[in-house]
Amino acid sequence: MANVFIEPVLAGYTGEEHAEVFDLRAIPKPTKERRVGQLSEDEVRRFFLEGYVLVKDVFRKETLETCKTAINEMVDELAQKLYKAGKITDLCTNFGFSDRLIRLEKQFPGANVLFIKQARLTQAFKDLWTDEALLNIIEQLIGPDIAGHPVWNLRAKIPRDEATTVPWHQDSGYLDTNSYRVLQPTAWIPFVDATETNGCLQIMQGGHKSGKVATHQCCHGGTWYVMLEEDEMEKTLGINVKTDIRTCPVPLGSIILFNNLIPHRSLNNVSDHVRWSVDLRWQNPGYPYGYYDLKEGVIFRTKDNPNPVVDWDTFEGVDRFQISADAVKEKTQDEEAVEFDTSIQGPWMKKWEIVHINQHVLKMQSEEKSS
Ligand SMILES: O=C(O)CCC(=O)C(=O)O
């Protein structure tokens, strides 16, 4: 089956639906030879038909261990920073991967948000993002031209925490309208067994089929997340909330792949440990990324060069959280306030109706007033 991607019409594009980019018609031509890690034909079809697919045993334990070591190092850096600034009195060095951040959060509420903001693409995560088997899978979904998308998140979902419990949304709801007809698959990769208890994802099966982005609102409760009302999903996306929700536990080593129009959320973590995960995205570099011209993607493969040198320096040269931090710094000139600011702002907040005013929204509005 041919890839039917139609060149995005940027000027004047109003965001009407494009189901053909997300359904079976968009399946790229299979590669000539079978490659390591590739999905079965049935798995590829399920991704396009249902909007997501669970792929078992993608990563070896050692690959994930390297990422876990990197996470431990980043948590330690955060602990040291909080300690040096007198924000905490105990470095909690007796605790580890599963619970140290919970202990830091108890001493400094919002430590987990600081973690999200300060997470870096260490070599372990670069290797994960460009993992050969993973890129072979992505090529089956979008073809041989592959770039990493500017939006990636290392998530520390701590128990019973509103800030890391993500409400229903479509990923495109965070992006500029010019990317609505671009297929941007996400791999959601846990570093623990993700279960209903520790806050795995729920997906609204088939919610991508209309090709539409429904009307989101901002921001969910006390968070910076956009959200979708269930009524709105039923009305605009043609799903049935009573029958279409799928709870998606993911064992360590496995991943969920989903597309940018599928509504999803994560459950509350009611365990006693952190549910660590990373979400990584890819797309064809020839099309708009939708990050409001603030940041471009990073090329991993092209049809002519399946193994280019990846230009990480340019990609890392723009830190999307730093863009907001710089705006606050200019205003307050207070380095410490910026360093320990537990609020998050982003361009998506200007896109949808604001239905909850909270610390994240207020800061965004105050930046707007002063600019
Ligand atoms: O990991 C989570 O809790 C939410 C993930 C999510 O919403 C996403 O990757 O788009």
Image: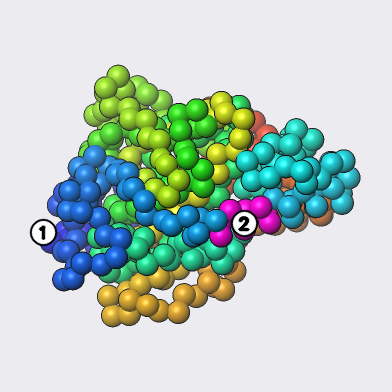
- The structure residue drawn at horizontal position 25% and vertical position 46%, both measured from the top left corner, is 47
Q: Give residue 69's mark.
A: 2
Q: Name the residue at the top extreme.
A: 242
Q: Is residue 367 magenta?
A: no
- The structure residue drawn at horizontal position 51% and vertical position 43%, both measured from the top left corner, is 192
Q: Is residue 180 left or right of residue 128?
A: left
Mark 2 against mark 1, which lies toward the viewer?
2
Give above or below for 278 relative to 217: below
Residue 142 seen by the camera: no
Front position in the image: 99 or 308: 99
10 Å crowding of disc 1: few (<14), some (14-19), many (20+): few
Q: Name the residue at the left extreme.
A: 1
Q: Amino acid at mark 1?
A: Met
Closer to the chain start, of discs 2 and 1, is 1
Give above or below for 319 relative to 267: below
Give above or below for 356 relative to 322: above
Q: Circle 1 sits in a helix, a strand or a loop, which is it?
A: loop
Q: Amino acid at mark 2?
A: Thr
- The structure residue drawn at horizontal position 16% and vertical position 71%, both measured from the top left corner, is 32
Q: Circle 2 sits in a helix, a strand or a loop, which is it?
A: helix
Color scheme of the displayed model: rainbow
Q: Position of residue 234 (x, y in %)?
A: 29, 25
Front position in the image: 360 or 57: 57
10 Å crowding of disc 2: few (<14), some (14-19), many (20+): few
Q: Is residue 250 left or right of residue 9?
A: right
The residue wearing badge 1 is 1
Please report the bounds of the magenta region as a residue range: 66-74
Q: Position of residue 159 (x, y in %)?
A: 61, 30
Q: Give residue 116's mark.
A: none
Q: Position of residue 179 (x, y in %)?
A: 36, 54
- The structure residue drawn at horizontal position 45% and vertical position 68%, both measured from the top left corner, is 298
